[in-house]
Image: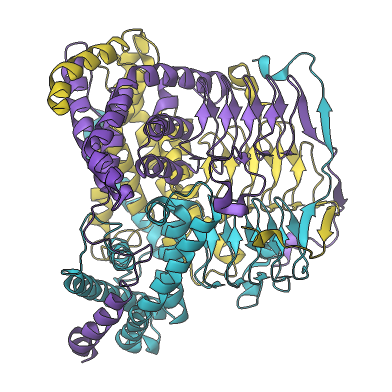
Chain colours: A purple, B yellow, C cyan
């Protein structure tokens, strides 16, 4: 029976061979027992913060005046406990053998308290984001419908939380959070970006907002928009350089537009048309549209669609 | 110990501050104990309907002639129970203090029965959709492989169910369903769109089909296609207006094409090429292609790709 | 009470009607008790293989020298058990009434052993992929951050496992795996594609890599890139034909570029610019850029963005 052969000899042999590949000290190998952030707990912390940001909306509990304080207090405490541990793991893991590892608990705690302390401000900003989504979408029926079902809201709320941890210098966790939103929404906002209130992303699939982007107040973005770098493939040599554009207040960027470069500034109130490709700055109030697209119209002969 | 300080003084203070932000009666706040649809149950209802639409394929139960009736009956009953409750919550929540809230149970029940009653018809349509996917994709090996793994099938089946609830006037739920499909597949079909049978979406990531789109029979769409509005940022002022295009029977729309506007009609049998941007109607049978794209070819000197 | 009416008469009637639609023997119907691969177990096998490919990184276990062998051995054995059963179901289901069904257990086992045997090689290749992602992205802070959070790594690792099963001739399972990655990352790599080491996909949403694509070593691809077929809507008549391009070593393909056709070869070291649309071959070392895009700049008058 092959299965027995497998379970006795082949398994042992393959285990040996595979274990041998862990020995070279490169990236995807074990690190002598250092503990990484636990993905499940990191995401549970995010869900817990969402429950506080949108009370009674994203879980089935009816939140009332009567139970509001205990509801909020319990969740804040739970989020704190999860994050203080996982942020410490992240800091310690990242520091490696570095002396900085000793500072890990204090550094993690400072960062987590800064995030929690920012929650009232984040909630205020998110209310403005949700209002902007409702204002900007004729298919929106209510503010609650926007919160319950719009992927842009999930991506932006996740980004706003992640950005606080990013600013506080916590490694790994911010990107884990924004990549969860990316996986769920197709919207990829790097936690390093700086984004003002009343930010609206419609549909959202394919949106990419790079690490050093700066976005002002009341900006709307549609699916497939990239705020990117001019030559990203230059890689690590560009780390820390401002590589992504600046978008001023009241700008609308329609679907599929690409705006590249750290020196590129889209001036206040500009409207960037769909599929426009921009690598230079635009003055305030300007509309940028694609030139008359050269399309070829072939009248009916034998229909290609019917050949199959 | 900072942790103790947190759990005693800071926690209470932050809870107070955060609770204070719930008091202004705006969108993302509690609503005095009104119960929203429970996301978990709403999605369980969708999964239950999927089990009936594709019996024996999407769950591990072996469905046979012998157990078919009880299998179907049990699931229909379960879906009914979940949906009648959640649709009532949706109707009641949406009505708010409105007198219409009293009608919520009857209205919800009527809508759910209409959906269930439509299931035989939906199944018939989905069979045609699956057949179209198989016919249209050389990588498809069998009808079952299409159902088991094609994201387009999941998105279209979810849309067809959501559209029934949308037509029956249930708030919140239809969009919650289609946004789950959007999250899983990158395909964003508004439940208000009207779409004929033999609808095929290949790959699908980035597809957006707006609320007032009308799509005929035997239409194929590839990844990144938008059927959108001309000036969506005009927002709520456009609610109820036909803003999205009409696609007649037997049309193929290749990847990345954008078709905008409520007056735009793509005539029967037309083929729209990849990346084409259209804001006006196209006569039946026409092929629309991008003009010869002006590309710049720079021969090798110092390779940019090697600079990093 | 309408609910009672439903549960007695309407339920029975609808069950009868719906059950009647399963009788026509078409694609989305039961198959007399034949057992399909169980999706939950198929995905558990994938997760188990991931645990072995990236030990200690994607689960919370601290893997050390001391527990490495039992950790690896236990997971290999678990993956084997799951996959041998599910691959057998896939082979048997696909064979249908065919005499080949008798060969299902042996064929499944051979394929699964081939996959497991390839794991050391796959791990080596993935290490190179991760290194390439780190080298190529200025936002990357460490190799571990890349593994923990980059969707491209998940998509590529899933593809490399699925490709082994594809080459071994297992039906259904490879595509189920790559479609899970597609759902999570927006990156759609057909398991039939052949892709060399140091493959890097950044952001990734909307990437489509067709079944007969061939990709060399050290290739970088950005979001929204399609390696596709020229006339995919011709469907089943093209099955087995090389329909997708060949990308030679050291090529960079920027966001939104589309490269089509089985005869199209992108020569070594070429750089394909963003949004470029290519249906013909490119000589080695060439840079291909879009011609000066004809944009229309309208200076400020009454701002459209402010009309809402």
Front residue of this view, candidates A20 and C304: A20
Residue A265 rendering spot, x and y as whole percentages: 68, 29
When asked about the image quadrant of residue C1, the answer is top left
In the rendering, at what x and y percent does residue C106 appear? 31, 88
Q: Is residue B197 above or below residue C231?
A: above
Q: Is residue C122 left or right of residue A305?
A: left
Residue that extends furthest to the front in the rendered view of this protein:
A99
Q: Position of residue C202 (x, y in %)?
A: 54, 53
Quadrant in which the C terminus of chain B appears: bottom right
C77 left or right of A198 in image? left
Total numbered labels: 0
Residue A91 showing in the rendered view: yes
Residue C98 percent location from the top left of the image:
40, 85
Front residue of A129/A36: it is A36
Please give the name of the residue rendered at 51% of the width and 62% of the height, measured from the top-left corner: C132
For residue A256, which quarter of the picture?
top right
Q: Quadrant of the N terminus of chain B?
A: top left
The residue positioned 53% from the left and 56% from the top of the image is B129
Residue C24 visible, this orientation: no
- Given residues C199 and A292, the one toward you in this image is C199
Q: Would residue B115 appear left or right of A60 to someone viewing this image?
A: right
């Amino acid at each position: 029976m092959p299965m027995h052969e497998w379970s006795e000899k082949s398994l042992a042999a393959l285990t040996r061979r595979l274990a041998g590949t862990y020995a070279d000290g490169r990236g995807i190998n074990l690190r002598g027992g250092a503990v990484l952030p636990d993905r499940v707990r990191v995401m549970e912390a995010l869900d817990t913060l969402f429950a506080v940001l949108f009370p009674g909306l994203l879980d089935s509990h009816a939140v009332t005046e009567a139970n509001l304080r205990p509801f909020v207090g319990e969740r804040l405490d739970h989020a704190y406990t999860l994050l203080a541990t996982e942020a410490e793991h992240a800091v310690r893991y990242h520091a490696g053998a570095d002396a900085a590892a000793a500072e890990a608990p204090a550094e993690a705690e400072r960062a987590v308290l800064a995030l929690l302390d920012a929650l009232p401000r984040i909630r205020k900003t998110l209310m403005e984001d949700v209002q902007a989504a409702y204002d900007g979408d004729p298919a929106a029926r209510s503010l609650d419908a926007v919160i319950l079902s719009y992927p842009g809201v999930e991506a932006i709320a996740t980004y706003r939380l992640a950005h606080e941890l990013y600013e506080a210098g916590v490694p790994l966790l911010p990107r884990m959070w924004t990549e969860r939103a990316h996986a769920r929404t197709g919207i990829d906002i790097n936690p390093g970006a700086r984004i003002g209130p009343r930010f609206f992303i419609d549909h959202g699939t394919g949106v990419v907002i790079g690490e050093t982007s700066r976005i002002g107040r009341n900006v709307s973005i549609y699916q497939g928009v990239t705020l990117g770098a001019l030559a990203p493939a230059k890689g690590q040599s560009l780390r820390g350089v401002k590589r992504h554009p600046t978008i001023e207040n009241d700008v609308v960027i329609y679907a599929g537009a690409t705006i590249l470069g750290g020196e590129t500034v889209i001036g206040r109130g500009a409207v960037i048309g769909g599929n426009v490709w921009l690598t230079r700055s635009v003055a305030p109030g300007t509309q940028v549209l694609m030139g008359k697209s050269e399309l070829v119209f072939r009248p009916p002969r034998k229909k290609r669609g019917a050949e199959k």
